[in-house]
Image: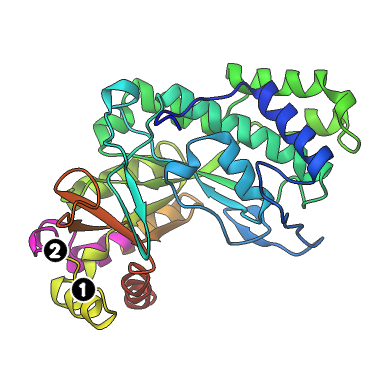
Amino acid sequence: MSDRMTCMPFSQLLNWVLDEYRTQRTVFGVHHPYAAKDGQFLELFGRKLETPVGPAAGPHTQLAQNIIAAYFSGSRFFEVKTVQIIDGEDLPVSKPCIKADDEGYNVEWSTELYVSQAQDEYIKAWVILHLIAKEFGLGAQDGFQFNMSVGYDLAGIKSEKINTFVDSLTEAKETESFKNAIATAKAAIGKFQKVTLADIEAIPSTICNSATISTLHGCPPQEIESIANYLITEKHLNTFVKCNPTLLGYAFARKTMDAMGYDYLVFGEFHFDDDLQYKDAVPMFERLIALAESQGLSFGVKLTNTFPVDIKRNELPGNEMYMSGKALFPLTISLAARLKGI
C-alpha cells in the first residue's frame, strides 16, 4: 500500500460510486447506508443538518471518497481536514503516522495534499453528496454541511494561498473544480435514475458558511482571538475555536488518566503551562460570542483537540504523539461540562 494519497478525477469518482452501488449496493465498501427520515433535521448556521454526526478533521477527511463513504454511513457534518500555508512536499509527515489499538495516537497535522488539491477534493465530495442523496434515497440534498478548518496563525490564513481556499469554499461557482463537476454530472445524466438536470443545476456553490480555527500548542490567546475576529468580521463565517484538553490543568488530566487505567501515558506539565489558560479562555469566548452575535453569526468551541503525550515505547516515529479516541473522551466531556455555562 502506498503512503501517498492519490486524488481521483471527478468522473472516476462518480462512475465508481454509481457502478458500485448499482452492482453491489455498497459505496467504497460501506455495506449499511443510512437514510434520513423526511422532515427530521436540526438547524445549524441557518442550514439543515439531518444528523449531528460526522468525522472531525483528520487524515480521513482529506480525500473525497472518504467523505462520501462517511456520508453513506450516516455522517452529515463534515469538518474537512485543516489547511495551512505549508503544504504538499514542503510538509513531510513521518509514516506510519497513526496507531489505533485501544486509545488512538497520531503524529500527523494538517493535510498532506497541496491546498489547491484539498480544495478540489472537498468540492468534488460536495457535489457527489448532493447527487447520491437523491439518487440513493439517503436524505435531503441540503441535509448536510461542510465546515472548513484553517490554521495555524493569522498571517498564514491571510496569505493568498489560504485566502483563496477560504473564499473558494465560501463561494465555489468560479472554481474550475466546481464547474467541471457540474459539467461532468450533466454529461453523465444517462447514468442516473432519479437525479435530473434541474437537480444538478440546483447544487449550491456556497459550500461553507462556517470555519474551525486550528492553532498549534502554545499559541498565544491574542493570536487565537485575532484569527476568530478576522473570520467573523472579514470573512463573515460562523466560527469555532478548537480547544486543547490542557485547559483542564495538569493535575486533573493526570488524575483522570490514572483513574481510567491510562497511568502508562507519559506527559509533563509543559503544554499545560504553555497552552491557553482557562482563566483567559472564558473571557475570550464571551467576547467572541458577543462579536458573532453582532454580525448575525454564531461562535462556538470544538471539543477537543488531541492530547500530546511522550513516545516511550516506539509507538510511532519521533518524540511526541497526539492521543485521541477512547482515552480522550473523559477529558473532552469534562471540559464540555466546565464550559457549558458560558
User: x and y percent of residue 258 in the render?
Assistant: 21, 79
Q: Which mark is residue 253?
A: 1
Depicted 278 relative to depicted 238: above or below: below
Mainly helix, strand or loop, the magenta region?
Answer: helix
Left or right of residue 49, residue 268 in this image:
left
User: x and y percent of residue 321 in the render?
Assistant: 23, 51
Q: Which mark is residue 39?
A: none
Magenta includes 272? yes
Depicted 302 relative to depicted 335: above or below: above
User: x and y percent of residue 216 in the render?
Assistant: 23, 46
What whole-number distance in Å separates the C-alpha atoms at marks 1 and 2?
A: 10 Å
Depicted 214 relative to depicted 258: above or below: above
Left or right of residue 244, residue 22 in this image:
right
Along the viewing direction, whichever of 183 and 173 lies nearer the viewer: 183
* Neighbour tally class for label 1: few under 14, some 14-19, many 20 plus, Cα within 10 Å: many
* Neighbour tally class for label 2: few under 14, some 14-19, many 20 plus, Cα within 10 Å: some
Along the viewing direction, whichever of 199 and 36 lies nearer the viewer: 36
Along the viewing direction, whichever of 299 and 311 lies nearer the viewer: 311
Question: Where are the magenta residues, as a range?
Answer: 267-285
Q: Quadrant of residue 275?
A: bottom left
Circle 1 — which element?
helix
Circle 2 — which element?
loop
Q: What quarter of the picture does the N terminus occupy?
A: top left
Q: Residue furthest bottom?
A: 259
Residues tagged 1 and 2 counted as in contact (Cβ below 8 A): yes
Mark yes or no: residue 148 visible: no
Q: Quadrant of residue 159?
A: top left
Depicted 196 relative to depicted 250: above or below: above
